[in-house]
Image (cartoon, helix red, strand yellow):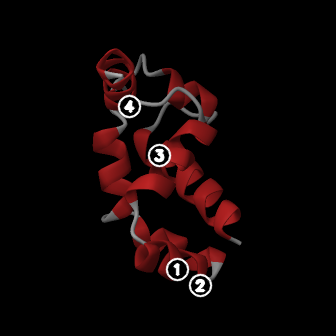
Amino acid sequence: MSKNWSFISQDILQPPNTVDDAVNRLMLILSYEERHSIAGMNQIDLIDLHFSLGAAIRNAYDLHNPTNPLLAECGTTFADDASDVIIQALWQQLQ
């Protein structure tokens, strides 16, 4: 069992490579209240998350690294735009 735990914990510490993986990790990390709050937002108001959740995503998922495959998965080379794509996908999943 500890062998599996080591593999899983090492994998989860690596930045995700796909938007789906990024959203799935957020679903595990965010509290029920946070998920509920995001789900209740109007899509146009998601920009309000730029300096809070967006910053956390950019930092935790290493989006400032220009070689990060998640940037290409998001269709951009800009960390700010990539975090927006991930937040939009999270919001869609929460609907």
Mark 3 lies on a secondary structure that is helix
Evaluate if marks 3 and 4 touch, with contact meaning CB atoms under 8 Å apart. yes
Q: Residues within 10 Å of mark 2 (few under 14, many from 20)?
A: few
Marks 3 and 1, the one that precedes in the sequence: 3
Q: CA distance from mark 2 to mark 4?
A: 28 Å
Residue located beneath label 1 in the image: 36
Residue 55 sits in quarter: bottom left
Q: Nearer the viewer, mark 2 or mark 1?
A: 1
How much space separates mark 1 and mark 4, taking CA atoms? 24 Å
Give coordinates of residue 69: x percent, y percent.
51, 21
Question: Does 88 appear above or below 47?
Answer: above
Check disc 2 and give the amino acid type.
Gly
**Residue 20 - label:** none
- Numbered circle sitting on residue 25: 3
Compare marks 3 and 4 and give the one earlier in the sequence: 4
The foreground one among 28 and 41 is 28
Say which of marks 3 and 2 sits in front. 3
Name the residue that disc number 2 marks.
40
Which of the two discs, 2 and 4, labels the residue nearer the N terminus?
Answer: 4
Q: CA distance from mark 3 to mark 1?
A: 16 Å
Gap between marks 3 and 4 measured at Cα:
8 Å
Residue 23 point in image, percent of width and height: 55, 48
